[in-house]
Amino acid sequence: MQAYIDAAQAPEKNTGAIKLYDREAFDGMRRACKLTSTCLDALAELVEPGVSTQDIDDFVHQFGLKHNAIPATLNYRGYTKSCCTSINHVVCHGIPNAKPMREGDIVNIDVTYVLDGWHGDSSRMYPVGEIKRAAARLIEVTYNSLMLGIDAIKPGATTGHIGEAIQTYAEAQRCSVVRDFCGHGVGRLFHDAPNILHYGRKGEGFELRPGMIFTIEPMINLGRPSVKILGDGWTAVTRDRSLSAQFEHSIGVTEEGCEIFTLSPAGYTLPPYVRS
Ligand code: MF3
Ligand code: CO
Ligand code: CO
């Protein structure tokens, strides 16, 4: 099998080959990703004590409909919600429900809109009211982990350079990197080759080439890295019940480095989210 393939010629399914996308594809991703990041910006004003994760899901659903976009998670492998909402020791894939969030919670909201066939996949952490210092620090370490992974992207580097940048930094901060979930190729498919591991060594994995499009989405824990899946078949939690955080961007590799498709239009980076 060939490792890299022109996306315009490739079958749409995941064959394991890495698709290289053209300028029109980058334009399509820019539009889908901008909608996702605009929604994540708007959610900053909604998240507060007493609001439920179902309220968040309703907002994400309505926002998508208003802009002719479908949430990719709806009916995805039996998942029935428009986003994932992962609170405190939930690592990822938390299912929205009617329970009100409480002061001091931290919640990851992960949104993927499909617009004109392109998938814009991104997530951020949101504090619910005032949060503890340890929680704020974990959020900062996780955000920095994502951005350091992105800084490692340039043609000729490998996916292992990304993993090493994230792991080296997160572990130096006495945090751990979740191994059970990874970033992924994205584009016309929600989840495509290659896997982007958030740990590893330079030179491992695949060489990065201009035209590749994928997500980086490190999950970082205050305690041990191991996770388990709850009986609902989706919710992943830390085994030691320590706090977990995650940020996710969709990016495209360029000749110079990369383009972050899901940057916040409002200029938000770390919470508290205040307009720049
Ligand atoms: N958006 C998640 C990701 O970053 C995937 C969620 S799949 C779901 O890849 F079914 F759990 F929603
Ligand atoms: Co993703
Ligand atoms: Co996501």
Image: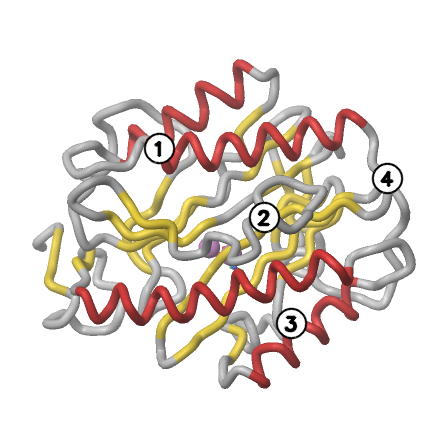
Would you name the residue on which mark 1 appears?
A: 151
Sooner in the amino-acid sequence: mark 4 or mark 1: 4
Between disc 1 and disc 2, the foreground one is 2
The residue that appears at 59% across and 48% down in the rendered structure is: 268
Label number found at residue 130: 4
* Mark 4 burial class by Cα count in 10 Å: few <14, some 14-19, many 20+: some
Name which quarter of the figure residue 115 lies in: bottom left
Sooner in the amino-acid sequence: mark 3 or mark 2: 3
Circle 3 SS class: helix
Q: Viewed as shown, does residue 224 lie left or right of 177?
A: right
Relative to residue 253, is residue 227 depicted above or below? above
Return the x and y of residue 84 as percentages of the image width and height: 63, 60
Q: Furthest-front residue in view?
A: 276
The residue that appears at 85% across and 62% down in the rendered structure is: 51
Circle 4 SS class: loop
Sooner in the amino-acid sequence: mark 1 or mark 3: 3
Q: CA distance from mark 1 to mark 2?
A: 18 Å
Relative to residue 170, is residue 65 depicted above or below? below
Circle 1 SS class: helix
Q: CA distance from mark 1 to mark 3?
A: 30 Å
Q: CA distance from mark 4 to mark 3?
A: 24 Å
Would you name the residue on which mark 3 appears?
A: 60
Q: CA distance from mark 4 to mark 2?
A: 18 Å
Circle 2 SS class: loop
Q: CA distance from mark 4 to mark 1?
A: 31 Å
Sooner in the amino-acid sequence: mark 4 or mark 2: 4
Would you name the residue on which mark 2 appears?
A: 268
Between disc 3 and disc 2, the foreground one is 2
